[in-house]
Amino acid sequence: MSFDRRSFLGSLPAFAAGTAAAAPSPLPTPLKNGSLENNLLAVIDDIQLVNTHEHITPENERVSSHVDFFTLASHYALSDVVSAGLAGDDLKLVRDEDAPAQRRWEAFEPHWRHARFGGYGQALRIAIRDIYGVEEISGDSLELINDRIRAKNKPGLYEDILIRKSKIAYSVLDDYWNAAPVSPDPKFFVYARKFDRFVVPQSASDLRALEELTGISITGAGGLKRAMERSFEQSLEAGMVNVKSTLAYNREIHYAEVPESDAEKDVQDLLKDAKAVPEGFRNRVTRPYRRMEDHMFHHLIQLAEAHKIPVQIHTGLHAGNGNFIENSKPTHLTNLFFLYPEVKFDLFHISYPYQGELSVLAKIFANVHVDFCWAHIISGSLSRRALHEMLETVPVNKIFGYGGDYRYPELSYAHAKMARRNIAQVLAEKVEEGFCGEGEALEIARMILHDNPDRMFGWRRG
């Protein structure tokens, strides 16, 4: 069956790139007391953020779960602690929720001492200080921290942290843990969906799981495409505002144009489990079903194009410990920008350490956008340098200034605080060097923190 990009699955309410979901707020008046940076920060602190990327679980799941200091440390901070040397039985102990807190701390602390200055450590320290009122993370304060976390872990937590403290208007939620689409709480979230499982199935059992998920029989490439289409349709019904892909964790993100006949050969081999998949399936060269993967990724982008849905793609640094960073270079995607000029691509994490490549791509392709999600907690100075450069190279309407990229709202709060501070510092420096006026600096801040991402992701919110 041939694919008609213009008519598949009918049409949705039009997503117009030039029309914001909400009218921009009036430009605030700069304050006149204190330093320029503090003046800007005082106003930037009141901007309602559009948070481009989160993994926050539903509040009812959060408040019914065991949560303590090590729970919060497990997202990102622990990766740096592992990089500093935590390993083996000590790592298992830190991850053991049933182990005594002080024993876990004794295993954690020697390596935390070296990791605490990194961006992940800074975010954790800010969260513990501002949300739970404890200035220092130590063995002496651990029991108090855990008591306060438990006391606050109840309904109302998300409204308090995400809305009141963080001043987040809404967040784009990637609920990667759900195979089938589940509408998130609209009070806090709009919906991103991943279709990577349809792009890179690696066994016949993976195909059977996709059949169960969608009710579509998969006997070849056509069936796999129809299964993706069914899931895409279901995701639209659940409120999807954009497509998300994290395949840079598994393979190089160059997707060649492959005819369906070649993809069909791979699917037939896959149905028979005819080819061995590399151990851990993170091999950067050997992809036994690569023709199928490339064909299916293009099919996904064609679905996004047909429905005017933006596409978020992981580029740059991988979470966790160990991977092939060169898989995630944003220039691998260049053919997509040419082939699908109507698709809006949101490239994550400023593609660090390839932020220069991303700056060039966003400068020369109208459909490429820069996203600072995760970046401010990777490195504040890196993010400031990148923002300096990108304000000079990329049209300002294509820069998204903040995405929390956390599981826990406390840490999204900390990331937002760090992002606001970084942006205020950069804009103060831009004013002082004559790049823009103070009013223009605040206009830039409002655009990159609210108006730009709202124009891309706020279209279902009315």
Image: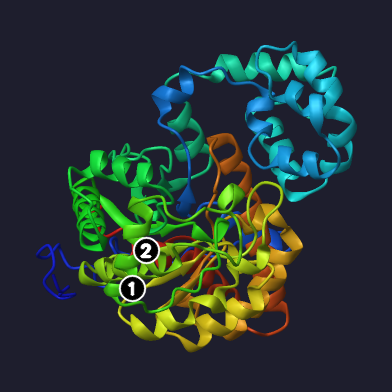
Residue drawn at point x = 33 percent, y = 49 percent: 191
Q: Position of residue 26 (x, y in %)?
A: 39, 64
Q: Is residue 62 left or right of residue 24?
A: right
| Quarter of the rendering occupied by the C terminus | bottom left
Q: Residues within 10 Å of mark 1 (few under 14, many from 20)?
A: some
Of helix, strand and loop, which one carries label 2?
helix
Which of the two residues, 219 or 108, is positioned nearer the viewer here?
A: 219
Name the disc covering residue 300, or none.
none
Q: Is residue 156 visible?
A: no
Residue drawn at point x = 14 percent, y = 62 percent: 12
| Quarter of the rendering occupied by the N terminus | bottom left
The span from disc 2 to disc 1 (Cα, nearest Å) is 7 Å
Residue drawn at point x = 19 percent, y = 52 percent: 230
Q: Is residue 222 visible?
A: yes
Where does label 2 land, which residue? Answer: 266
Residue drawn at point x = 33 percent, y = 73 percent: 262
Residue 372 location, quadrant: bottom right
> Does the residue at mark 2 contact the one at mark 1 (Cβ under 8 Å)?
yes
Where does label 1 land, which residue? Answer: 262
Q: Position of residue 387 (x, y in %)?
A: 64, 72
Q: Residues within 10 Å of mark 2 (few under 14, many from 20)?
A: many
Residue 14 location, quadrant: bottom left
Question: Which amino acid does the dot numbered 1 rest on?
Answer: Asp
Which of the two residues, 35 or 323, is positioned nearer the viewer here?
A: 323
